[in-house]
Amino acid sequence: MKSFESRPPVDYPRKRASIACNFCRHRKRKCDGQKPTCGLCTDAGAQCVYQESDRVQDIPAEILLRLTHLETLIEQQKDAITELSARVAASSDHPARSAPSIYSSQPKYDWDPSSEHVYDKSSFGLFSPENTYGNEYVFTIPFSHQTPTGSLFALDRVKNLVGDYPQDFFKQIEKKRPFNSIQVAGIPQAFEQIERSRLHPQATKPLITEFLHHVHPFFPIVEPQLLHMLFDTFSTYTKVNSIQTSLYLIILALGKVSSNPQQIFDIEADKDLSGMEYFASAYHYLNNPLITSFTADHLLPLALFYGSLYLRHIGRPIQAWQMIRDASGSVQIMISELHDMNTHEERASLYRIAWGCFILECDDLAEFHFPPSGIELLVDRLPFPRISEDSRNGHLVFLAMCSIRKLLNRVHSALYAKSDQENFQASPPPQHTSDTSSATPQKHSITSLKTISEELDRQLEDWFGSLPNPIRPTLGNTISANHPYDTYILARYYVTKHIICRPSLLFAAHTQGSTVLPEFVFANCKKCVDSCRKFIWAGSILMRQRTHGNWHRMQAMLAAIFTLSTAKTTPALEALVPDFDELVKEAIQCIELWSGHCEAADTIISMLKTIRQKVRVLVRGA
């Protein structure tokens, strides 16, 4: 018998249809696969119908998901390549000017600032003049930006949970809230009405100590020895209405309001007027336009600054902004009029006041759409403030707050302009075809979001890594209440991380079910959820006592819960928030300390309770 190998090869082609028609398949006959009608169907006069192959159903779902994901990544890379090509083409038109990389190295923060150290915004590649993402003034908060908590009211998921509210809802509440507490019976409305016993050193020295212990470390605007000189002078000269008198009274008021953290807003209590007995007369004096408009005394912006701090301690954001606006305007005029005759200490003092105004005013502009005073542009040209060292490291914390406030302004400018938000919530970038009329890519595609958020996150990590060891807290899953500076810095760090990553989470919620999420989007969602969680932990510690930032902190707490609830009600992100109910409960408990004395706090608590209840129902129903 001949072997198989020795047999002659078959000299005729084998015809086999890749897909048999329904008629041949049913009769189990060999189909020649001819279309539109095969041979057997022609002979039998039958209708020839071919069924599409179902082999794709045999492919595992995981493989299909990976293929879809790879296609998405390829489209993103095509978009990025087109964008880079446009940049190269633009830079070739200006050979003398090289376009900086968006990942250009950021200079380390100098924690021993000198007069030569001035931040140059062009050193940040993301915000260089050639970069399409930056604005002309990169450190300014754009008007009508979408960072405020109220902007989240526009989200459908938030509307479904709490109802339909205007985006300036909390601003309207505060504007309509009368400032009756300053007119309470027993509150002196003029300096002459203050009881002499309240100004006796036996009553004032403990308040000055409280001010130096609770307020000054976070805003070391004035050297302590100068403060003591001010206090000593006040006890010797004739006591009349003046800027110096007002400054002295406001410092006493701050010492009083920061010394009793338990009665947070109860400034009408008989036993605790929370410093209003000192503040009211100074407030009336400094609100005189003749004083704020035509006075060149360098103590004026300082008194206005401390007055704004006091109003923040008692939860009056509108009045606080009005005073910090006046302080910012005053210090800008005085710095513009500096000349060689001014001493170094006079310059340094005004610079410190300017930086303090910058922090407080930008906190207000980030939450309310107020007209800016221009302080952002001024500090862009100033060196970091010179502050003498102290044993409690308050000078380092203040410098850290100055620098991260600048970073926050970049975040507002780069990610939260109104047009940016509309584009970031759109679908993934479209495919670019060869017949595209313009080589310029979309300015705010999802690829742009990736590039900008990665750069801002890198700058945040650089900021945290550059903190000196004495004030650098430990990042982890626990936050201790034993170190106030640590909690203060961590709260700023996590709220910054949250707003950097929030657009990615909103994009994920908006596009859920319509596309595969890019890897960086999901990674940012995890960062966003984690930062919201840890901000709530840090914020709940800080809100146990009266501080200047608690009203804004309540808003940030609500924004964090809005963001977490969006993740919790998005199927792809729900697993990231297993502790959602506990986080809402913790937020409610810390804000309840403020309820009964602040309408905004009462409203936030009501919203949080509604969110907690509805999310429970939605999760169980799913």
Image (cartoon, rainbow, N blue to C red):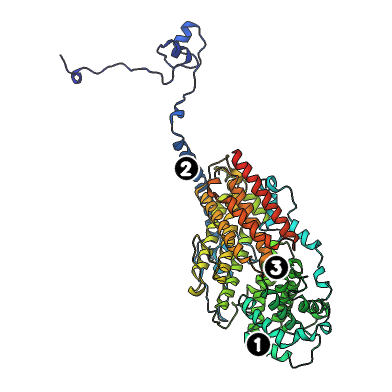
Which type of secondary structure does the marked residue at label 2 adopt? helix
Do the residues under discs 2 and 1 have CB atoms within 8 angstroms?
A: no
Whole-Å distance between the Cαs marked 3 and 1?
Answer: 30 Å
- Dot 3 or dot 1: first in sequence order is 1
> What residue is shown at x 57% (from left), y 50% (from top)?
446
Viewer can see residue 384? yes
Residue 587 on image: x %, y %? 63, 57
Residue indicated by mark 1: 226
- Determine crowd level at label 1: few under 14, some 14-19, many 20+ residues with C-alpha closer than 10 A: few
Is label 3 or label 2 in front?
3
Residue indicated by mark 2: 70
The one nearer the camera, 129 or 282, is: 282
> What residue is shown at x 63% (from left), y 42% (from top)?
617
Residue 194 falls in image quadrant: bottom right
Q: Is residue 47 left or right of residue 304?
A: left
Residue 31 on image: x %, y %? 42, 14
- Dot 2 or dot 1: first in sequence order is 2
Query: As displayed, is residue 621 above or below residue 364?
Result: above
Residue indicated by mark 3: 264
Query: As displayed, is residue 568 above or below residue 50?
Result: below
- The amino acid on which the numbered mark 2 sits, given as a three-letter code, is Leu
Residue 376 on image: x %, y %? 66, 70
Seen as rendered, the residue at the extreme front is 271
Q: Is residue 331 left or right of residue 108?
A: right
Q: How many marks?
A: 3
Is label 2 or label 1 in front?
1
Q: Quadrant of the N terminus?
A: top left
Query: As displayed, is residue 427 above or below residue 355?
Result: above
Seen as rendered, the residue at the extreme bottom is 236
- The amino acid on which the numbered mark 1 sits, given as a three-letter code, is Leu
- The amino acid on which the numbered mark 3 sits, given as a three-letter code, is Ile
